[in-house]
Image (cartoon, grey):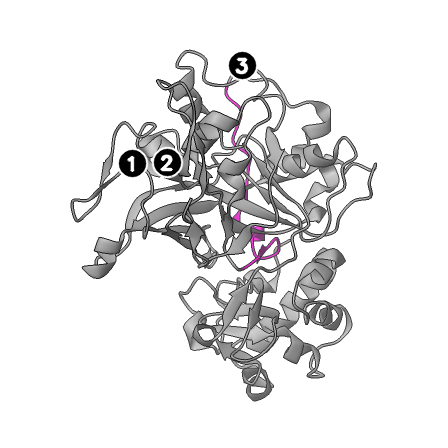
Amino acid sequence: MIDETHDATRRSWVASAQGSDFPIQNLPLGVFSPTGGPPRGGVAIGDQILDLAQAAASGLLSGEALAAAQAASGATLNPLLALGAAPRRALRRRLFELLSDGAQDQARVAAWLHPAADCTLHLPCAIGDYTDFYAGIHHALNVGRQFRPDNPLLPNYKHVPIGYHGRASSVRVSGAPVRRPNGQQKAPDVEAPVFGPARRLDLELELGVWIGPGNVLGEPVPIGEAEAHIAGLCLLNDWSARDLQAWEYQPLGPFLAKNFMTTVSPWIITAEALAPFRTAQAKRPEGDPTPLPYLMDEADQATGAYALQLGVLIRTPAMRQAGIAAHRLGQGPATNLYWTMAQLVTHHTVGGCDLRPGDLLGSGTISTPDDSGLGSLLELTRGGKEPITLPNGETRTFLEDGDELILAGRAVAEGFVSIGFGPCTGVVAPAPQA
Ligand code: CA
């Protein structure tokens, strides 16, 4: 739904908002603690964070907007996400009004702002469950080709959204160090596995979906109603130890290769903020099956994808020391997904499984069909066979200790102010002594 909060001519009296990831048209939700204070909900505006607990106590909010701010005053946003779209939108409209150029009460609202540089950001929700899908079809093809050149996609791929239940306990917010895992590895040409630090540590560029209202056990979410369960999106890095994965994944799928850590960007870019950036789901190639009726909805096909540009950047310790900026490994659109987010939500629940507010879904690695925007080193280096060269002459096949990996995302649409996701970063730390 497009409303006054998407008006491209509107500016904020918070000067740093203009041109940043967080202009007044974004207003993403997160959890932060100001210096010395407990965690509470906040909204990013430029280089400031608006304190929702202070807003709730101010007397300047009423009705659904007040209810939303009150639900966001604690250490997690699960209570806010449980409320659904209407209170979230009411809060957005009221904050938009209060932060707009020329707003009354500017001095009072200014007292709710904390410089982001002085704040600690936390996970926005207590994540009950995290599920990772595999909807990036070009990633599935690129990886499949390495193992099955003639038949890269398994026969189920175009019929059923592939996913596995991930590990919620090890999801961390951007900036947390990524400890290289120890584990079992077995090279194809040796008899027995060895134990030690993973040597093929990789990233996976994904979108995360934050679940709003949940569903009751045994009551699936129909495809036409799935959007109402999506509170917003974030960037998600599904760190992966490829050598552990290759040895352990059959027959039940990823386990320790994935569960040591997942990083998300701190801000929930709300469904409301993303409204102008909705676009048609990519047409399926001629000959592909039509989704089964429970996954098929015309409105979802017409607007269920997102016009986002996603990028991957790397900065090694030597680059940091030499003052060299992070190097872009690739960039591509988020439309390279074979299933919409609504289809993922509906499929997740179709057998009766209940989603809960604050649950997290991963889209699967998003890669381009060509080499311009590959979402993993596994693809960029052809399984480690073709090292990439960085601006200072260093090479990489997989991540080394001290490497910083940065995911970036931006929404772009003609006639609207572009909004960003904020960074999703992690620096690789050495494995614990085995
Ligand atoms: Ca993944």
Report the label total: 3
Residue named by callout 2: 200
In the image, what residue type sits under mark 2?
Arg
Tell me which residue sits at (82%, 43%) in the image. 216
Quadrant location of the C terminus in the rendered image = top left
Q: Position of residue 76 (x, y in %)?
A: 66, 63
Q: Position of residue 140 (x, y in %)?
A: 47, 26
Q: Are marks 3 and 1 in contact (CB under 8 Å)?
A: no
Q: Is residue 27 visible?
A: yes
Q: Is residue 281 magenta?
A: yes
What's the distance in space between the residues labelled 1 and 2, CA to CA? Answer: 8 Å
Residue named by callout 3: 287
Q: Are marks 1 and 2 in contact (CB under 8 Å)?
A: yes
Tell me which residue sits at (53%, 63%) in the image. 25
Label 2 or label 3, whichever comes before in sequence order? 2
Label 1 or label 2, whichever comes before in sequence order? 2
Q: Secondary structure at mark 1?
A: loop
Q: Quadrant of residue 141?
A: top left
Relative placement, left or right, of 293 versus 108 is right
Q: Position of residue 24 (x, y in %)?
A: 52, 68
Q: Is residue 110 above or below residue 352?
A: below
